[in-house]
Image (cartoon, rainbow, N blue to C red):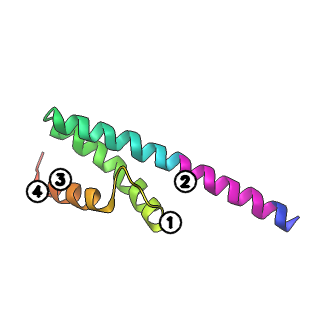
Amino acid sequence: MTIENDNIKNQQHKEDIAFRRGLLDKHSQLMRMYLRDNNIKLAKAQFEIIKPVFNFLNNEGEIMRYYTLEDFERDSKRFEKMSI
């Protein structure tokens, strides 16, 4: 019974990670699109969505190739400097 519960928890955790990776991917794409269009307000809104998702995945030890720690740090500094 314990092994079965552990397997269920592991599967749910994997699904949660996959879902959050998808969120990060889509919102980072939207943020980049808004930045290309010079829509800073909407880009910053997307970044605010990205922050907790990225932090969660980073704390879990997940490696993101499409939105890296360097990207996150750069965007943090960028939006910190901009006042809307």
Asked if the residues shown at circle 4 and circle 3 are in contact, with their CB atoms under 8 angstroms apart, the answer is yes
Mark 1 Cα within 10 Å, few/some/many (few <14, many 20+)? few
Mark 4 residue type? Lys
The main secondary structure of the magenta stretch is: helix
How far across and how far down the image is residue 74, in percent?
20, 58
Give the left or right position of residue 76, taking residue 3 as reference.
left
Mark 2 residue type? Ile
Image disc number at residue 17: 2
Secondary structure beneath disc 3? helix
Q: Which residues are magenta?
A: 5-18
* Residue at (53, 46) in percent of width and height: 19
Mark 3 lies on residue: 79
Relative to 29, does residue 78 appear above or below in the rendering? below
Earlier-in-chain disc, 3 versus 1: 1
| Alpha carbons under labels 3 and 1: distance apart | 25 Å
Mark 1 lies on residue: 60
Mark 3 residue type? Phe
Secondary structure beneath disc 1? loop
Image disc number at residue 77: none
Mark 1 residue type? Glu
